[in-house]
Image (cartoon, rainbow, N blue to C red):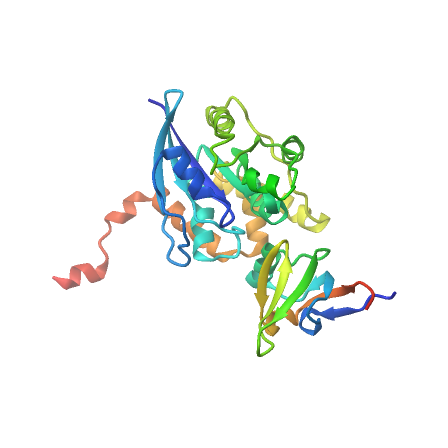
Amino acid sequence: MRMYTIALAGNPNTGKSTLFNTLTGLRQHTGNWAGKTVLTAAGEFVHHDVTYRVIDLPGTYSLYSNSADEEVARDYIIFEQPDVTVVVVDATSLERNLNLALQVLEMTNRVVLCVNLMDEAKRLGVHVDVTRIRQKLGVPTVAISARNRTGIDELLEQVEKVASGKIIPQPVTISYSAEIEQKIKELEPHILRLLGTRFPPRWIALRLLDGDEKLLASLKAHLDTVAAPGLKEVVPHEQISCH
Amino acid sequence: MASTTIPLSEAKTGMRLVLTGINVQGVLRRRLLDLGFVPGNVIEVLQKSPLGDPVAFRVNNTTIALRREESSQIFGNILGGE
């Protein structure tokens, strides 16, 4: 049976874990795991005879302030490359939430935007124009209330389409100042030569320009484990001298 | 009504300001931007702690407390008739 992996990303308290529980039928406790974050929860569900593995990423406002949670979320999206990343945003404070959504869209086009807490927004008199968000961002966008289980069917439909490749989202490209765009253009060919298309070259270029050393360290560690498994067989000197 | 640019650390409780700039670099700058301290954004001074530091600000519908160390490096124009 075909299996797809879905990552749930989003700000803290947007209802990711509620959605996770709704999808998987598990009882993952909601709460904060600040600091010592490991990938906290993974579950599965079956939809149209396809198994979906769901990963509940730590809630973060960003992927670049380099706190432990943010690194976990960022590294998962960039290195594990889930078939679909569902970005869960809070309908009552989109302005703050879309920051993370845009960051994810720079990393991958395999995104479904999930506007959660629609019941709460309605109560506050907030109207969310989902069609307009979809047009502006260029990715499937679904309004749901994970708590009331509304919109879940449509969410699954969009997830299925993106996972299977029936829809290939074309997310908006964020353009930077002329100076930065020029530097991106200079870096991209080098990145392509070194890394191929495994990682989005534009995104890597931006991280290089950002001087994000932690990301570069993660990238190096990732490449070492993937590219040179033979090195693991070398016994460290200390280990020999123990005997 | 000329607008005056002041650091957030000088703003009084209840004031609303349009941010004009952040004089912080690196990861902290990134963090402040992520939290909504973005030029053009309107923030409100909610309240000061008993010793005057940190101060709570309303940003993007969320309350964020900053110490003087940071708030003195963030600048804005006072909104309203003051």
- Classify residue A229 as left or right of residue A127: left
Q: Residue at x 54, y 24 (%)?
A: A167
From the viewer's side, name the closer residue of A177 and A123: A123
Q: Which residue is outermost to the bottom?
A: B51
Indicate whether A119 appears above or below A215. Answer: above
Residue B52, quarter of picture: bottom right
* Number of numbered discs on residues: 0
Task: Evaluate whether residue A190 shows in this view.
Answer: no
Q: Nearer the viewer, residue A54 or A143?
A: A143
Position of the C terminus of chain B, as image quadrant, is: bottom right
Give the vertical position of B76 relative to A185 (above or below): below
Q: Residue furthest front?
A: A123
**Identity of the residue drawn at 64% across and 38% down:** A173
Q: Which quadrant does the N terminus of chain B fall into?
A: bottom right
The residue positioned farthest toward the left in the image shown: A243
Q: Position of residue A234 (x, y in %)?
A: 24, 51
Instruction: List x then y, in percent, for residue B42.
Output: 71, 57
Q: Position of residue B34 (x, y in %)?
A: 59, 55
Horizontal relation, residue A114 to residue A27: left or right: right
Quarter where residue A89 is shown: top right
Indicate whether A110 appears above or below B46: above
At x 37% / y 57%, what residue is drawn? A36
Q: Residue at x 43, y 45 (%)?
A: A57
